[in-house]
Image (spheres, coloured by chain):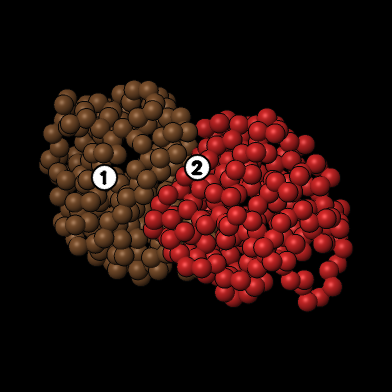
Chain colours: A brown, B red
Amino acid sequence: MKVVVLCSGGMDSVAALYWARAHHAVSAVLSFDYGSKHNHQEIPRAVEHARLLGFPHRTIRLDFIGQLFASDLLKSGGDIPEGHYADDNMRRTVVPFRNGIMLAAAAGFAESAEAQGLVIAAHTGDHTIYPDCREDFMRAMGDAMKAGTYAGIELLRPFIALTKGQIAAEGARLGVDFARTWSCYKGGAIHCGKCGTCVERREAFLQAGLVDPTEYEATPPLPDKPVEHKGAK
Amino acid sequence: MKVVVLCSGGMDSVAALYWARAHHAVSAVLSFDYGSKHNHQEIPRAVEHARLLGFPHRTIRLDFIGQLFASDLLKSGGDIPEGHYADDNMRRTVVPFRNGIMLAAAAGFAESAEAQGLVIAAHTGDHTIYPDCREDFMRAMGDAMKAGTYAGIELLRPFIALTKGQIAAEGARLGVDFARTWSCYKGGAIHCGKCGTCVERREAFLQAGLVDPTEYEATPPLPDKPVEHKGAK
């Protein structure tokens, strides 16, 4: 199937790009610049992997999000909270309906590019504090994309049953160089090691039994419970 | 309910704005500039009605559509076809997943603006050549917006059972000055009278038993069948 891959430059979506290359015909790699503090660090990683694999890359600018929406994830918002991702304060980093907006724009782009599918790296660890990561949202949005396009664009979620650790293992198996991916919400020169995404990044490598190639300002804290080594199926 | 109204500046969505004013608390009026040939004529009409009624107006620029998508409706596309809207050649004016993209962006905006509903002027005459006007798309997209936002944003379609003629009658009853609305896809100095939207505009006024206040370059042809005078319910 001809597919467009949503790739932010983070570890999950870069792994999804390598998965798509192995299983489908990749028409294009798509990133979104929505005015977040870390887009300028993420997107060049997506560009780099697209170039490495020989696929066209496009960045879609969603300037209205930075101009009109309220979220601490945005350059226009407050400081990124520190601590584990699941904490309540991470709600401040929600960008309202971000996945809905990115999927809708990508569906229109995919239809224009004569693709039949869209690949997104949604996974089992996506947080239910984000309503647009929940299963009932994803299912309805997939239905809307199918019904609202001539091609009946299909939403592919190859990692939906995997943890972030399992995605890391699968990505490593597919040849992803994770040193060339970005997670940190703060978007500084190197990963901060304190925000929720840095903490989860480090946990994912631990769970996958991989060496974490990331340079952190401060080493992210280990989780309270011992890490289960899961590996990819 | 606090609502955001999608208003292009066309006759249906301006009528929807007046309907929303009568039945809800309007937080904001939202237009989209997606690089079409007629946005520059439409949007000022939406701004004008928002100002008349005292509501804030915002324009969301979707530049990526004009840059990356293929459609004759866009400045980047070919000529607007002439003749009745239902003709096959109108398919060239489809902007892939346009309604999906506008609704998704509006849902995020509405959540940020602390509204609970979105009003769209979808109606029974919307053409099934546009997949993102079909009922199954609208239902799925409404579900996605509800599931993907904290507020459970509701998609309101007050005109879904009305014809364009009945909307014109309802708009007139609510005080809409239709001379201050724009339909023509060509986006010239005045309405061309030849494109599908001009033909439908004239038919709507006929069906509503209203005087058509529009200045056309060429008087749009009357439909083959006698026009049924329907009026609003």
Query: Residue B187 appears at what percent x and percent y?
Result: 57, 56
Residue A32 appears anywhere in the view:
yes
**For this rendering, which residue is in front, B82 or B65?**
B82
At numbered mark 1, what does the secondary structure look like: helix, strand or loop? helix
User: What's the residue at 38%, 65% (across, down)?
Assistant: A113
| Mark 1 vs 2: CB contact within 8 A | no
Q: Is residue A154 left or right of residue B189?
A: left
Q: Is residue A60 left or right of residue B168?
A: left
What is the secondary structure assignment of the residue under circle 2? strand
The kind of residue on which mark 2 rests is Ile
Q: Chain of mark 1?
A: A
Residue A87, numbered circle: none
Tell which of B174 and B210 is nearer to you: B210
**Residue A52 falls in image quadrant:** bottom left
Mark 1: which amino acid? Ile
Horizontal side of A69 relative to B204 (left or right) equals: left
Q: At which x and y percent is residue A11?
A: 24, 46
The percent position of residue A77, horizontal first and vertical second, equals 39, 26
Residue highlighted by disc 1 = A43
Query: Marks 1 and 2, Cα distance to the nearest angstrom?
Result: 23 Å
Where in the figure is residue A91, as x and y percent of width and height? 43, 29
Residue at point 51% right, 48% down? B33
Q: Is residue B147 left or right of residue B224?
A: left
Count neighbours of disc 1 (C-alpha within 10 A) and say few if under 14, some if 14 to 19, many if 20 or more. Answer: many
Q: Please state, as top left, top right, bottom left or bottom right, where the N terminus of chain B lies in the image.
A: top right
Q: Which residue is mark 2?
A: B60
Residue A90 in sight: no
Kindly identify which chain the residue marked by label 2 belongs to.
Answer: B
Using the rendered view, name the quadrant where residue A71 is placed: top left
Q: Nearer the viewer, residue B71 or B198?
A: B198
